[in-house]
Image (cartoon, coloured by chain):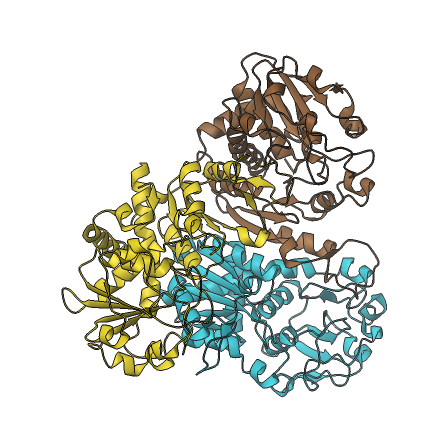
Chain colours: A brown, B yellow, C cyan
Amino acid sequence: MRRFLTPEDLGDLRKALDEARYVKANPFADQDLGRNKTLLLIFFNSSLRTRLSSQRAATNMGMNVIVLDINKDGWKLESEYGVVMDGDKPEHIREAVPVMGQYADIIGVRSFADFVDRDKDYKEHILNQFIELSGRPVISLESATRHPLQAFADLITVEEYKTKPRPKVVMTWAPHPRALPQAVPNSFVEWMKKADVELVMTCPKGYELAPEFMEGLTYEPDQDKALAGADFVYAKNWSSYHEYGQILSKDRSWTVDENKMALTNNAKFMHCLPVRRNMIVSDEVIEGPNSIVIPEAANRVVSMQVVLKRMLQSMK
Amino acid sequence: MRRFLTPEDLGDLRKALDEARYVKANPFADQDLGRNKTLLLIFFNSSLRTRLSSQRAATNMGMNVIVLDINKDGWKLESEYGVVMDGDKPEHIREAVPVMGQYADIIGVRSFADFVDRDKDYKEHILNQFIELSGRPVISLESATRHPLQAFADLITVEEYKTKPRPKVVMTWAPHPRALPQAVPNSFVEWMKKADVELVMTCPKGYELAPEFMEGLTYEPDQDKALAGADFVYAKNWSSYHEYGQILSKDRSWTVDENKMALTNNAKFMHCLPVRRNMIVSDEVIEGPNSIVIPEAANRVVSMQVVLKRMLQSMK
Amino acid sequence: MRRFLTPEDLGDLRKALDEARYVKANPFADQDLGRNKTLLLIFFNSSLRTRLSSQRAATNMGMNVIVLDINKDGWKLESEYGVVMDGDKPEHIREAVPVMGQYADIIGVRSFADFVDRDKDYKEHILNQFIELSGRPVISLESATRHPLQAFADLITVEEYKTKPRPKVVMTWAPHPRALPQAVPNSFVEWMKKADVELVMTCPKGYELAPEFMEGLTYEPDQDKALAGADFVYAKNWSSYHEYGQILSKDRSWTVDENKMALTNNAKFMHCLPVRRNMIVSDEVIEGPNSIVIPEAANRVVSMQVVLKRMLQSMK
């Protein structure tokens, strides 16, 4: 495996879920694969869960880890071709990325959408330069349009907590004070559409995802109707795709509280975290017995470890 | 051991000192205990000695280490209950801490007093949330009111350098340009009161420690009288407890110089570092033959390693 | 080996190149030397290649690594003697450095020239305090006047790519928008003068290096004449030594482009990176088939690993 961005990169999801179960039960079983291999984690944007879970997954696999926080150094990379570099950017991405590839065996990159140019964001401009130029397998640690480690961890979590073969999974938009990327909802629907679940998405008008993610997706604009009979409620905020990066609503009637949860089939509550309490979800729901946000976060180690294991195996 | 904050957490100090001696002589002897275990070090405040010595102690034990500098990211945690989180705090401590617990086996936390609310500081508000919510053993890497790894290292150092069964140990306040926490003097007296030493504390009026730390402590307001016959002089600045966080004096007649040291029984000079030269102590004294500040700092690895070993043993 | 700053520290260069070849072919062969040893990397100035390649080299050797970015913390060290430390510097270098030595087995230090005081820079004021006070072997990770890990990597690269016993190596100054240190060119000529190459240096008048580096060096002020028949072109910008730290020229007729390369004997193009495209070198040349900047960067792991191996061997 040379790239981890979409479910297609992982192939058969059943098999991947079997591997996840194995890795979770035997976290230290494959250290021979990782011995003397280095994972380089590059953060253009800051991170808590992704950084910690990736470091943990890599050391579970016996790997060495190097973390590079590029944003803190104010290290700016030129990415245009033909520029006379007499300004504030000391290095071109066409040198920087191949060099990083010389020092690592696998590279993880976090680089959010910058909301300036939708086309550039949706072409995964930064991530793809790492894929093209680094010479190494590359993992999205949340890139401009996707957060596949989160979506895979979400799928693992649904698999663990489901009580019927084909549960109803509802992803609902919820309000937030800031303009957030679409990476998490994009990946969530991309993965769940391929999984053995009944997927429904609900959001206010104007918050529909990009066409490629809406395709084949059951969309229900009425949140209450969407939640009816749900086995899992996955709450998340995102900003508008169509009015790109804009906040169209902060309507707190979309906040997931006990009244909303009462509409469901005793659903489990999920969120990728960090979560704004009493905006996205009420204190009662997130601390309630049906909240599985902490084991969901714990599965971030598992999803990363499966991806690392696959990549290490393909290097042998 | 689930918590390291006070000498009670360590139990019998004689036994702990025996373990320290063993660990120092055999630093790599217990790597089977630490194998595949991860220590997460969380710094709300910056650190040199604590960070380096903790990393070293953990790798000596065969552990993996993850360092998280929370202050640098400007990552603000909400800690109030029931708040509508529409401001600048993206995450609630009630999610952040349990999540961190999922990625680590032992957690160390540095979080200084903020001098805003004495009661909150003295309740160890931040540290206790980690103890309550993380699900993991928690080590204070200097918290609001205590710095137990330093005090234990100090005790190990006194034990190594003492030339009589029950040495006289004098802790003296000394001037400093900034308002410093009481954590180091609090822990120092808390530990030394339990050790086999004659402990005297001296400071200007108004600098007395909190009642729980003054209890049973020999206090001598005249620095010269206190120093008479001392075997160890432990200098430290702190701000006022009673006029909380205030600087009441910068009187440099309290600086420990050769004249002061001449009053002692050829005492060893100790300080936790970093130290302001010619405020706390003169160049001559800190560079003189009786200064043991460097071996004292080296013992920070030993105190941490004993604590890690205890915690790892209690996990087996 | 207690210090790595000049080629003399490494001794016989033939032997060192043999070791480099061995280490590159067998990167994990000497982990018993590094086991339970800690490399502390201290960055007063930021770093990409040096940090990553040093971490990689150390883990290849089985060592533990601790990285300390001192600049980010704004941690200021007092280095004058006799100062009353009541200002903004919380610690004296005479405590800080010995303490760091207690927690590490080998110390690497990056500290650039500050261009304030040429004599102080050329005395390697910071690096030498680490050498004197730390009690540990010390490696320059680019210090005020030298970048020996780069120069050694450059020599390894020339050795790998040369097609005749004694190639012609031309170091040429090239324009840059900022005032850069002389460390890279100083070390490059210092190492190449001892190697089996025909070395020529070319730069505009006023950019001659310090006398100790010019001594015995073939200097050709006409860039075209210098490049004639070159087997290797090593481009680099530096600021003036004689008008210390000043930019005397940004003349882009010195940029290495295809016309310049046409003057050579089909020369390989080298640069230490990061490089300003179309200032130092044209896009065509740096991306052309004769550019060896990426394998040159890869050899930074090799040069560091040879140095670590030597130091670890001398500790046994």
Q: Where is residue A25 shown, x and y percent of the image? A: 45, 28
Which residue is at the front of the view, C205 or C24? C205
Q: Is residue C136 visible?
A: yes
Total residue callouts: 0
Q: Where is residue C214 shown, x and y percent of the image? A: 65, 85
Q: Is residue C196 visible?
A: no
Identify whether A93 is placed above or below C46: above
Which residue shows up at 19% across the image and 53% down it?
B14
| Residue A108 sits in quarter | top right
Image quadrant occupied by the N terminus of chain A: top right
Which residue is at the front of the view, C275 or A168? A168
Identify whether A129 is placed above or below C240: above
Q: With C70 as the anchor, is C197 left or right in this view?
A: right
Which residue is at the front of the view, B195 or C6? B195
Identify whether C107 is placed above or below C244: above
Which residue is at the front of the view, A264 or C189? A264
Q: Where is residue B301 shown, x and y percent of the image? A: 35, 57
| Residue A146 sits in quarter | top right
Image quadrant occupied by the C terminus of chain A: top right
Q: Where is residue B308 shown, x and y percent of the image? A: 34, 47
Q: With C127 as the anchor, is B85 left or right in this view?
A: right
